[in-house]
Image: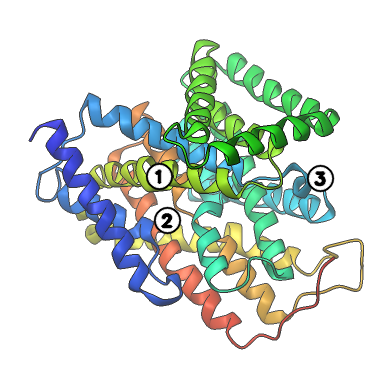
Amino acid sequence: MSALSALFVILVGCVLAASIAHFVPHRLLPEVIVLLGYGIAVGPHGLGWVHPGAELGLIGEIGMAFLFLMAGYEVDQRDLVSRLGRNATYTWIVSLMLAAGVIWWRGRIDVISVEGGATIIAMTATALGTLLPILRDRGILGSPQGRFIMTQGAVGEVGPILLIALVLSARSTVISVIGVIGFAVATFVIMIVRKRVVEAGERIVRMIHLEAETTAQLSVRLAAVLLVGLVALADGLGIDLVLGAFAAGFIVRQTIPNGREEFDGKLDGLAYGFFIPIFFVISGTAIDPAVVVNDFAGWLWFLACLIAVRGLPIFVASFFPLTDDLHTRLGFRERISAACYATTNLPIIVAVTQLAVSQEAMSVTTASTLVCAGAASVLVMPLAAFLVGARSPASRDLR
Protein backbone atom coordinates (compact mmCIF):
# COMPACT_ATOMS: atom_id res chain seq x y z
CA MET A 1 0.00 0.00 0.00
CA SER A 2 1.33 3.44 -0.95
CA ALA A 3 2.08 6.07 1.67
CA LEU A 4 -0.90 8.15 0.52
CA SER A 5 -3.26 5.17 0.78
CA ALA A 6 -1.86 4.32 4.21
CA LEU A 7 -2.40 7.93 5.31
CA PHE A 8 -6.02 7.67 4.15
CA VAL A 9 -6.48 4.51 6.23
CA ILE A 10 -4.97 6.29 9.24
CA LEU A 11 -7.22 9.34 8.84
CA VAL A 12 -10.30 7.10 8.62
CA GLY A 13 -9.24 5.65 11.96
CA CYS A 14 -8.84 9.14 13.43
CA VAL A 15 -12.44 9.96 12.47
CA LEU A 16 -13.74 6.66 13.85
CA ALA A 17 -11.83 7.13 17.11
CA ALA A 18 -13.30 10.59 17.69
CA SER A 19 -16.81 9.32 16.90
CA ILE A 20 -16.56 6.27 19.16
CA ALA A 21 -15.08 8.22 22.08
CA HIS A 22 -17.76 10.91 21.73
CA PHE A 23 -20.63 8.50 22.25
CA VAL A 24 -19.18 6.90 25.40
CA PRO A 25 -20.46 8.91 28.41
CA HIS A 26 -18.15 10.62 30.91
CA ARG A 27 -15.08 10.02 28.68
CA LEU A 28 -14.85 6.47 30.02
CA LEU A 29 -13.22 5.42 26.73
CA PRO A 30 -10.53 8.00 25.91
CA GLU A 31 -9.87 8.60 22.23
CA VAL A 32 -6.18 7.75 22.54
CA ILE A 33 -7.10 4.15 23.43
CA VAL A 34 -9.16 3.79 20.25
CA LEU A 35 -6.36 5.33 18.18
CA LEU A 36 -3.77 2.89 19.50
CA GLY A 37 -6.14 -0.04 19.07
CA TYR A 38 -6.84 1.00 15.49
CA GLY A 39 -3.10 1.25 14.85
CA ILE A 40 -2.62 -2.29 16.14
CA ALA A 41 -5.46 -3.52 13.91
CA VAL A 42 -4.20 -1.97 10.65
CA GLY A 43 -0.48 -2.32 11.37
CA PRO A 44 2.01 -5.07 10.49
CA HIS A 45 0.85 -7.24 13.41
CA GLY A 46 -2.79 -6.94 12.33
CA LEU A 47 -4.31 -6.51 8.87
CA GLY A 48 -1.02 -5.28 7.46
CA TRP A 49 -2.50 -2.24 5.71
CA VAL A 50 -0.11 0.31 7.23
CA HIS A 51 3.66 -0.13 7.25
CA PRO A 52 5.14 3.20 8.39
CA GLY A 53 7.95 4.33 6.12
CA ALA A 54 9.90 7.56 5.77
CA GLU A 55 6.87 9.62 4.70
CA LEU A 56 4.55 8.50 7.48
CA GLY A 57 7.47 8.53 9.90
CA LEU A 58 7.99 12.24 9.24
CA ILE A 59 4.30 13.00 9.87
CA GLY A 60 4.45 10.90 13.03
CA GLU A 61 7.53 12.80 14.20
CA ILE A 62 5.74 16.11 13.65
CA GLY A 63 2.83 14.63 15.60
CA MET A 64 5.15 13.83 18.50
CA ALA A 65 6.49 17.38 18.33
CA PHE A 66 2.95 18.75 18.51
CA LEU A 67 2.21 16.44 21.44
CA PHE A 68 5.02 17.98 23.47
CA LEU A 69 4.24 21.49 22.22
CA MET A 70 0.73 21.10 23.63
CA ALA A 71 2.23 19.72 26.85
CA GLY A 72 4.31 22.89 27.18
CA TYR A 73 1.28 25.00 26.27
CA GLU A 74 -0.73 23.47 29.13
CA VAL A 75 1.88 24.47 31.72
CA ASP A 76 1.65 27.84 33.48
CA GLN A 77 4.89 28.75 35.27
CA ARG A 78 2.84 30.51 37.97
CA ASP A 79 1.42 27.14 38.97
CA LEU A 80 4.90 25.63 39.17
CA VAL A 81 6.20 28.25 41.63
CA SER A 82 3.07 28.31 43.80
CA ARG A 83 2.64 26.34 47.01
CA LEU A 84 0.69 23.75 45.05
CA GLY A 85 3.59 23.63 42.59
CA ARG A 86 6.17 23.02 45.30
CA ASN A 87 3.96 20.29 46.74
CA ALA A 88 3.75 18.68 43.29
CA THR A 89 7.51 18.98 42.72
CA TYR A 90 8.37 17.25 45.99
CA THR A 91 5.80 14.58 45.19
CA TRP A 92 7.30 13.94 41.77
CA ILE A 93 10.81 13.66 43.25
CA VAL A 94 9.49 11.04 45.67
CA SER A 95 7.91 9.19 42.72
CA LEU A 96 11.25 9.35 40.91
CA MET A 97 13.08 7.76 43.83
CA LEU A 98 10.40 5.11 44.27
CA ALA A 99 10.57 4.23 40.56
CA ALA A 100 14.36 3.85 40.73
CA GLY A 101 13.96 1.73 43.86
CA VAL A 102 11.42 -0.57 42.21
CA ILE A 103 13.64 -1.12 39.17
CA TRP A 104 16.66 -1.79 41.38
CA TRP A 105 14.65 -4.21 43.52
CA ARG A 106 13.39 -6.14 40.49
CA GLY A 107 16.94 -6.44 39.19
CA ARG A 108 15.96 -7.11 35.57
CA ILE A 109 17.02 -3.71 34.23
CA ASP A 110 20.10 -1.65 35.05
CA VAL A 111 18.85 1.52 36.76
CA ILE A 112 21.51 3.70 35.13
CA SER A 113 20.97 2.31 31.61
CA VAL A 114 18.92 4.03 28.91
CA GLU A 115 16.24 1.36 29.26
CA GLY A 116 16.19 1.87 33.02
CA GLY A 117 15.90 5.63 32.60
CA ALA A 118 13.10 5.24 30.07
CA THR A 119 11.19 2.95 32.43
CA ILE A 120 11.62 5.39 35.33
CA ILE A 121 10.30 8.23 33.16
CA ALA A 122 7.34 6.10 32.12
CA MET A 123 6.49 5.39 35.76
CA THR A 124 6.53 9.00 36.94
CA ALA A 125 4.60 10.87 34.23
CA THR A 126 1.01 12.11 34.16
CA ALA A 127 -1.06 12.38 30.98
CA LEU A 128 -2.19 15.97 31.46
CA GLY A 129 -3.38 16.34 27.87
CA THR A 130 -5.50 13.20 28.18
CA LEU A 131 -6.94 14.36 31.50
CA LEU A 132 -7.98 17.84 30.36
CA PRO A 133 -11.10 16.85 28.38
CA ILE A 134 -12.05 14.27 31.02
CA LEU A 135 -11.87 16.79 33.86
CA ARG A 136 -13.69 19.40 31.77
CA ASP A 137 -16.55 17.03 30.90
CA ARG A 138 -16.94 15.98 34.53
CA GLY A 139 -17.01 19.56 35.83
CA ILE A 140 -13.82 19.17 37.86
CA LEU A 141 -11.43 21.41 35.93
CA GLY A 142 -12.17 24.68 37.77
CA SER A 143 -12.69 23.12 41.19
CA PRO A 144 -10.14 22.95 44.04
CA GLN A 145 -9.65 19.27 43.29
CA GLY A 146 -9.11 20.15 39.64
CA ARG A 147 -6.42 22.71 40.51
CA PHE A 148 -4.63 20.09 42.61
CA ILE A 149 -4.78 17.52 39.80
CA MET A 150 -3.69 20.01 37.14
CA THR A 151 -0.68 21.16 39.17
CA GLN A 152 0.39 17.58 39.90
CA GLY A 153 -0.09 16.82 36.22
CA ALA A 154 1.92 19.85 35.10
CA VAL A 155 4.93 18.78 37.16
CA GLY A 156 4.29 15.21 36.02
CA GLU A 157 4.87 16.41 32.46
CA VAL A 158 7.67 18.96 32.91
CA GLY A 159 9.86 16.64 35.00
CA PRO A 160 9.68 13.61 32.67
CA ILE A 161 10.16 15.77 29.57
CA LEU A 162 13.35 17.28 30.99
CA LEU A 163 14.52 13.76 31.87
CA ILE A 164 13.76 12.60 28.32
CA ALA A 165 16.04 15.36 27.01
CA LEU A 166 18.80 14.15 29.34
CA VAL A 167 18.40 10.37 29.25
CA LEU A 168 17.01 9.61 25.78
CA SER A 169 18.66 12.30 23.71
CA ALA A 170 20.56 11.01 20.69
CA ARG A 171 23.15 13.69 21.44
CA SER A 172 25.90 13.67 24.02
CA THR A 173 25.10 14.13 27.69
CA VAL A 174 26.94 17.48 27.79
CA ILE A 175 24.86 18.87 24.92
CA SER A 176 21.67 17.59 26.53
CA VAL A 177 22.56 19.27 29.83
CA ILE A 178 23.28 22.51 27.97
CA GLY A 179 19.87 22.26 26.34
CA VAL A 180 18.09 21.80 29.67
CA ILE A 181 20.05 24.69 31.21
CA GLY A 182 19.14 26.83 28.21
CA PHE A 183 15.47 26.02 28.74
CA ALA A 184 15.77 26.98 32.42
CA VAL A 185 17.48 30.27 31.54
CA ALA A 186 14.82 31.08 28.95
CA THR A 187 12.11 30.38 31.53
CA PHE A 188 13.82 32.69 34.03
CA VAL A 189 14.12 35.48 31.45
CA ILE A 190 10.44 35.15 30.54
CA MET A 191 9.51 35.44 34.22
CA ILE A 192 11.60 38.63 34.57
CA VAL A 193 10.25 40.38 31.47
CA ARG A 194 6.79 38.82 31.74
CA LYS A 195 4.95 42.14 31.38
CA ARG A 196 6.57 42.97 28.05
CA VAL A 197 6.13 39.41 26.83
CA VAL A 198 2.42 39.52 27.68
CA GLU A 199 2.01 42.90 25.95
CA ALA A 200 3.55 41.44 22.80
CA GLY A 201 1.27 38.44 23.12
CA GLU A 202 -1.82 40.64 23.41
CA ARG A 203 -0.88 42.37 20.17
CA ILE A 204 -0.61 38.96 18.53
CA VAL A 205 -4.03 38.01 19.89
CA ARG A 206 -5.58 41.19 18.45
CA MET A 207 -3.98 40.46 15.11
CA ILE A 208 -5.29 36.90 15.20
CA HIS A 209 -8.77 38.15 16.06
CA LEU A 210 -8.75 40.54 13.10
CA GLU A 211 -7.53 37.81 10.74
CA ALA A 212 -9.75 35.07 12.21
CA GLU A 213 -12.24 35.06 9.35
CA THR A 214 -9.77 35.38 6.49
CA THR A 215 -8.24 32.58 4.46
CA ALA A 216 -4.77 33.53 5.70
CA GLN A 217 -5.23 31.64 9.01
CA LEU A 218 -2.33 33.64 10.44
CA SER A 219 -2.50 32.02 13.86
CA VAL A 220 -2.15 28.51 12.43
CA ARG A 221 0.85 29.59 10.40
CA LEU A 222 2.45 31.31 13.39
CA ALA A 223 2.04 28.19 15.51
CA ALA A 224 3.50 25.98 12.78
CA VAL A 225 6.42 28.34 12.17
CA LEU A 226 7.22 28.52 15.89
CA LEU A 227 7.06 24.75 16.33
CA VAL A 228 9.07 23.75 13.28
CA GLY A 229 11.48 26.65 13.77
CA LEU A 230 12.31 25.81 17.38
CA VAL A 231 12.50 22.08 16.67
CA ALA A 232 14.82 22.76 13.73
CA LEU A 233 16.89 25.10 15.91
CA ALA A 234 17.05 22.46 18.62
CA ASP A 235 18.20 19.89 16.08
CA GLY A 236 20.80 22.28 14.67
CA LEU A 237 22.15 23.00 18.15
CA GLY A 238 22.21 19.31 18.99
CA ILE A 239 19.30 19.53 21.45
CA ASP A 240 16.57 16.88 21.54
CA LEU A 241 13.36 17.37 19.54
CA VAL A 242 11.23 16.82 22.64
CA LEU A 243 12.76 19.74 24.53
CA GLY A 244 12.53 22.05 21.51
CA ALA A 245 8.84 21.28 21.02
CA PHE A 246 8.07 21.62 24.73
CA ALA A 247 9.91 24.95 24.85
CA ALA A 248 7.85 26.19 21.90
CA GLY A 249 4.60 25.43 23.70
CA PHE A 250 5.85 26.89 26.97
CA ILE A 251 6.92 30.14 25.31
CA VAL A 252 3.58 30.53 23.55
CA ARG A 253 1.70 29.94 26.82
CA GLN A 254 3.68 32.61 28.67
CA THR A 255 3.28 35.02 25.77
CA ILE A 256 -0.50 34.66 25.56
CA PRO A 257 -1.76 33.87 29.07
CA ASN A 258 -5.18 35.49 28.59
CA GLY A 259 -7.60 36.00 25.73
CA ARG A 260 -6.45 32.86 23.96
CA GLU A 261 -9.81 31.52 22.71
CA GLU A 262 -9.15 32.10 19.01
CA PHE A 263 -5.59 30.87 19.19
CA ASP A 264 -6.55 27.87 21.34
CA GLY A 265 -9.14 26.73 18.84
CA LYS A 266 -6.80 26.94 15.89
CA LEU A 267 -3.87 25.33 17.68
CA ASP A 268 -6.08 22.52 18.98
CA GLY A 269 -7.43 21.97 15.49
CA LEU A 270 -3.97 21.66 13.98
CA ALA A 271 -2.53 19.52 16.78
CA TYR A 272 -5.38 17.32 18.04
CA GLY A 273 -7.31 17.42 14.78
CA PHE A 274 -4.54 16.07 12.55
CA PHE A 275 -0.97 15.48 13.68
CA ILE A 276 -1.33 14.03 17.19
CA PRO A 277 -3.99 11.41 16.28
CA ILE A 278 -1.79 10.27 13.39
CA PHE A 279 1.14 9.93 15.81
CA PHE A 280 -0.86 7.64 18.09
CA VAL A 281 -2.12 5.47 15.22
CA ILE A 282 1.42 5.11 13.86
CA SER A 283 2.63 4.29 17.39
CA GLY A 284 -0.08 1.62 17.60
CA THR A 285 1.25 -0.08 14.47
CA ALA A 286 4.46 -0.88 16.37
CA ILE A 287 2.64 -2.68 19.21
CA ASP A 288 2.62 -6.46 19.06
CA PRO A 289 -0.81 -7.69 20.25
CA ALA A 290 0.70 -11.06 21.12
CA VAL A 291 2.54 -9.33 23.97
CA VAL A 292 -0.75 -8.06 25.35
CA VAL A 293 -2.04 -11.63 25.53
CA ASN A 294 1.13 -13.51 26.43
CA ASP A 295 2.59 -11.01 28.91
CA PHE A 296 -0.57 -10.25 30.86
CA ALA A 297 1.30 -10.49 34.17
CA GLY A 298 4.02 -8.14 32.91
CA TRP A 299 1.84 -5.19 31.99
CA LEU A 300 -0.42 -5.79 35.00
CA TRP A 301 2.69 -5.58 37.20
CA PHE A 302 3.73 -2.31 35.55
CA LEU A 303 0.22 -0.92 36.06
CA ALA A 304 0.52 -1.79 39.75
CA CYS A 305 3.89 0.00 39.80
CA LEU A 306 2.28 3.10 38.28
CA ILE A 307 -0.29 3.14 41.06
CA ALA A 308 2.31 2.61 43.79
CA VAL A 309 4.97 4.94 42.39
CA ARG A 310 2.76 7.78 41.15
CA GLY A 311 -0.68 7.44 42.70
CA LEU A 312 0.29 6.69 46.30
CA PRO A 313 2.66 9.69 46.73
CA ILE A 314 0.02 12.02 45.28
CA PHE A 315 -2.57 10.65 47.69
CA VAL A 316 -0.18 11.26 50.61
CA ALA A 317 0.70 14.74 49.28
CA SER A 318 -2.97 15.72 49.35
CA PHE A 319 -2.86 15.60 53.17
CA PHE A 320 -0.28 18.39 53.31
CA PRO A 321 -1.31 22.09 53.26
CA LEU A 322 -2.09 22.87 49.64
CA THR A 323 -2.22 26.67 49.75
CA ASP A 324 -1.31 29.48 52.09
CA ASP A 325 -4.61 28.80 53.83
CA LEU A 326 -3.42 26.01 56.14
CA HIS A 327 -6.97 25.10 57.11
CA THR A 328 -7.98 24.15 53.59
CA ARG A 329 -8.29 20.42 52.96
CA LEU A 330 -9.74 18.11 50.34
CA GLY A 331 -12.29 15.48 51.27
CA PHE A 332 -11.04 11.91 51.69
CA ARG A 333 -12.81 10.66 48.58
CA GLU A 334 -11.48 13.63 46.62
CA ARG A 335 -7.94 12.73 47.66
CA ILE A 336 -8.36 9.18 46.38
CA SER A 337 -10.04 10.42 43.20
CA ALA A 338 -7.28 12.99 42.56
CA ALA A 339 -4.59 10.32 42.96
CA CYS A 340 -6.42 8.09 40.48
CA TYR A 341 -6.70 10.88 37.91
CA ALA A 342 -3.02 11.83 38.27
CA THR A 343 -1.94 8.20 37.75
CA THR A 344 -3.36 8.30 34.22
CA ASN A 345 -0.34 7.95 31.96
CA LEU A 346 -0.05 7.05 28.30
CA PRO A 347 1.22 9.72 25.85
CA ILE A 348 4.65 10.08 27.47
CA ILE A 349 4.92 6.28 27.77
CA VAL A 350 4.27 6.01 24.03
CA ALA A 351 6.82 8.71 23.24
CA VAL A 352 9.52 7.51 25.62
CA THR A 353 9.29 3.86 24.52
CA GLN A 354 9.35 4.88 20.87
CA LEU A 355 12.52 6.89 21.45
CA ALA A 356 14.13 4.04 23.41
CA VAL A 357 13.26 1.48 20.71
CA SER A 358 14.60 3.78 17.98
CA GLN A 359 17.93 3.88 19.85
CA GLU A 360 17.85 0.06 20.21
CA ALA A 361 17.95 0.54 23.98
CA MET A 362 14.60 -1.20 24.55
CA SER A 363 13.03 -4.21 22.89
CA VAL A 364 9.71 -3.98 21.06
CA THR A 365 8.32 -6.54 23.51
CA THR A 366 9.16 -4.41 26.54
CA ALA A 367 7.86 -1.27 24.84
CA SER A 368 4.58 -3.01 23.98
CA THR A 369 4.21 -4.13 27.60
CA LEU A 370 4.72 -0.60 28.94
CA VAL A 371 2.34 0.94 26.40
CA CYS A 372 -0.29 -1.68 27.21
CA ALA A 373 0.00 -0.85 30.92
CA GLY A 374 -0.30 2.85 30.10
CA ALA A 375 -3.40 2.18 28.02
CA ALA A 376 -4.86 0.23 30.94
CA SER A 377 -4.18 3.20 33.24
CA VAL A 378 -6.08 5.52 30.88
CA LEU A 379 -9.01 3.11 30.92
CA VAL A 380 -9.02 2.10 34.58
CA MET A 381 -7.84 5.11 36.58
CA PRO A 382 -10.33 7.76 35.33
CA LEU A 383 -13.11 5.20 35.78
CA ALA A 384 -11.96 4.47 39.34
CA ALA A 385 -11.72 8.21 40.02
CA PHE A 386 -15.24 8.72 38.67
CA LEU A 387 -16.68 5.93 40.82
CA VAL A 388 -14.86 7.07 43.97
CA GLY A 389 -15.59 10.76 43.46
CA ALA A 390 -19.20 10.39 42.36
CA ARG A 391 -20.46 10.61 45.93
CA SER A 392 -17.80 12.92 47.34
CA PRO A 393 -18.98 16.31 48.62
CA ALA A 394 -17.73 19.40 46.86
CA SER A 395 -14.61 20.69 48.52
CA ARG A 396 -14.07 24.25 49.58
CA ASP A 397 -12.22 26.65 47.36
CA LEU A 398 -8.44 26.46 47.64
CA ARG A 399 -7.88 30.10 46.95
Q: Earlier in the sequence, mark 1 or mark 2?
A: 1
Q: Position of residue 181 (x, y in %)?
A: 70, 22
The quarter in which the N terminus is drawn is top left
Q: Earlier in the sequence, mark 3 or mark 1?
A: 3
User: How many discs appear?
Assistant: 3
The amino acid type found where label 1 is placed reads Val
Q: Are marks 1 and 2 in contact (CB under 8 Å)?
A: yes
Residue 321 seen from this side: yes
- Mark 2 highlights which residue? 374
Can you say whether 36 is above or below 242 in the image? below
The answer to which image quadrant residue 230 occupies is top right
Which is in the foreground here, disc 3 or disc 2?
3
Can you say whether 337 is above or below 238 in the image? below
Return the mark for residue 385.
Answer: none
- Mark 3 highlights which residue? 81
Q: CA distance from mark 3 to mark 2?
A: 29 Å
Front-most of residues 258 and 390: 258
Residue at the (45%, 61%) spot, across then down: 303
Q: Secondary structure at mark 1?
A: helix
Q: Secondary structure at mark 2?
A: helix
Q: CA distance from mark 1 to mark 2?
A: 8 Å
Can you say whether 271 is above or below 37 in the image? above
Q: In this rendering, would 274 be left or right of 286?
A: right
Front-most of residues 8 and 373: 8
The amino acid type found where label 2 is placed reads Gly
Q: In this rendering, would 240 be left or right of 153?
A: left
Residue at the (16%, 49%) spot, across then down: 42
- Mark 1 highlights which residue? 350
